[in-house]
Amino acid sequence: LNTVVLVGSPNVGKSVIFNYLTGAYATVSNYPGTTVDVSHGKSKINGNLYEIIDTPGMYSLTPFTEEERVTRQLLCTKKSDVLIHVVDTKNIRRMISMTLQLMDAGFPVILNLNIIDEAKQAGIIVNTELLSAILGIPVVATAAVRKAGLDNLKKEVRNYKYRKGTVFKFSDDIENIIDRVSSKLTHNYPFSKRMTALLLLAGDDTIQRLAATEPAYLDIADEIKAAAEKYEYGIDYELTVQRQAIVEKILASCMIRGKPARQGLMEKLGCWTRKPITGIPILCLVLYIGLYQIVGKFGAGFLVDYIDNNIFARYINPQIEHIVNQHIPWAWMQSLVIGEYGVFSLGFRYAVVIILPIVGTFFLVFALLEDCGYLPRLAMLVDRIFKYLGLNGRAVIPMTLGLGCGTMAVMVTRTLETRRERVLATFLLALTIPCSAQLGVILALLSHNNLALMLWTGYIVTIFIIVGWITAHILPGQRSSFYLEIPPLRLPLLSNIVTKAWMRMFWYFIEILPVFIVTSLIMWFADRSGALLFIVKLVEPVIRLLGLPTETAQAFLLGFFRRDYGAAGLYDMSSSGLLTDRQLLIAAVTLTLFIPCVAQLAVMVKERGLKLTLLMVFVISLLAFSAGYLMSLLLTVYNIPL
Amino acid sequence: VKKAIPITKFKSGDVVQIVSLRKDDRHLHKLAAFGILPGSEVEILQVIPAYVLKIDHTQIALDYEIARNILVYKQKRQGF
């Protein structure tokens, strides 16, 4: 099986090409760094089967972030038959230097000039044939989103025969050093000897470890040391600068920079969303419409009601009850399906009626924002605020995604640069950020009382900031700086948004439905065996301290399996009039802060390790109940009527 | 000889040419990947709440901490 690997900077369209070649789906967006994992797929090109691999974006062969490390690792271990370097043509000047690196490394490179349509708009025209002749490798122009040129790309893959490509020399001094180092290399390396020498000079840890057992390692180390001292900025930077000079020379002969087309509406809008004077009102508008109106009112309000009353209560519930009563003679088994903790009434119905519409609408909104390129602007606008929390603007993506699904968000914390930031973000996600399902239910619960809703929002935001600030000061480690590419605002493709939202929803559903079912089974068993009563008794004193009815204890236990599940439990209690607004507010606060669902915990353990997760769980439980208690005290002391 | 000054001394709309970057900056290589290299021409699009620089057709947002390490000359040509 021949292997085709797609590499390139973030946000150049690798995933679009992957989707086209394989017919499978990899997340495509207008946000740098959305592919955090390697995707595999198969493609039939002219009768031959190929394995296609999509990689997280990387800017150069020397990795800086976790995603880049993932790609580098893959390039080191997986032998590719064709390596397609996808670049954004309008930024060709800064992208070709990685092509040169890949060629130096000895990879079978095809250069793919993608997004050629935007380049034309920007007045950039590249002579692909001439570029191909200069580089000595195939060059194909495409506009993947518009499906233009993709047949040519397929053709090049099918007809590909290994060509080394032109070797572009650095200055003589450097070439001499490269020669001296590479002549001493005797092991097998994942890259060509030339590239291995270059990476060694650049101080690459991974390669250095491989080379440490070379017989002539001491000589090599001396060479590297001497080279490092020779250049003011270090040899790595010197290589980068020289490589850029080579790129300029190449492009001088085959690229024309004409006048860009007039600023369109998208450019203007892109500018408005970026400047604080217009950007902050737009940000508020986006949050208000996106989160409150669409997810809160439409998803959690209208859709949940509609599905519950008009579909389930009218058609499905009676049907199931009828079947169960007809065919299952034993009461215990009836209750297993349709009882209070039944697999159907609790597990399936909650998942479909309450959770699905909320999560679905959230993912639609998120996909829209992602694809039009709004998120990096959001990151830039809130950077300063996030700095106070020991994070930077980049963290806005996992945080906002956390408003959709905390589990997914913890996975995306990988895009943050330092371990410290990843720990901070994971903690804040687990403590303060309610997922869309929980958020939706809480909005629905509190929306009839504006004061309660405002108090809840203000309280959670305050805790988010205070706890974030304190944690940032306790946790050791370096402060991180903010830098992010701001992509152009693009008119998103509706089909892409729907597919993406659908894929995420599907993933979510597949992941949660079993948890719901298992949870209802455990609850049913605990209820029947009396264990539930025992645990509830244990938690009751705490609950009573908060001034809540003891039934709330169950909602909290449910909340451990899924946070939203707990909120949904509150929803049921409030529907049957068991909670006053004051109690509702305290319960909502405590539950929002309480430990995340089982799935999020599992991902936390996987990403951050068991010890740290347990510590977080302990701190979070403590904080959640103290905050709830404090809220009830505040309400009493200030005598706030709800 | 003109003296190179930090890009943070300029205002939005200015077009500058990068002379060098402070050596001790640990972001040197990341910036290089964005095209922020000696010789590049950069337009400053905005400075608040973060710096947004335009290099060719790429817009990059940077915070003050990084931006102050970029040393530049002012270009004659005004921004478009």
Image (cartoon, rainbow, N blue to C red):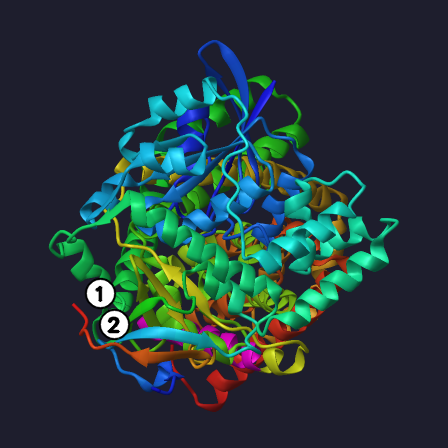
Q: What is the C-alpha distance between the residues marked 1 and 2? A: 6 Å
Q: Give the residues drawn in magenta, as a range.
A: A449-469
Residue bearing the label numbered 1: A271
**Chain under numbered label 2:** A
**Residue under disc 1 on the same chain as residue under disc 2:** yes
Q: From the viewer's perspective, is residue A557 above or below residue A54?
A: below
The numbered mark at residue A275 is 2
Which quadrant would the C terminus of chain A be assigned to in this image?
Answer: bottom left
Question: In the image, residue A381 lies at what x, y percent?
Answer: 35, 71
Task: Point out the residue furthest to the top here.
Answer: A47
Q: Residues within 10 Å of mark 1 (few under 14, many from 20)?
A: some
Front-lying residue, A389 or A419: A419
Front-lying residue, A547 or A445: A445
Task: Point out the residue furthest to the bottom here.
Answer: A637
Question: In the image, residue A306 lies at what x, y percent?
Answer: 31, 41
Q: Quadrant of residue A547?
A: bottom right
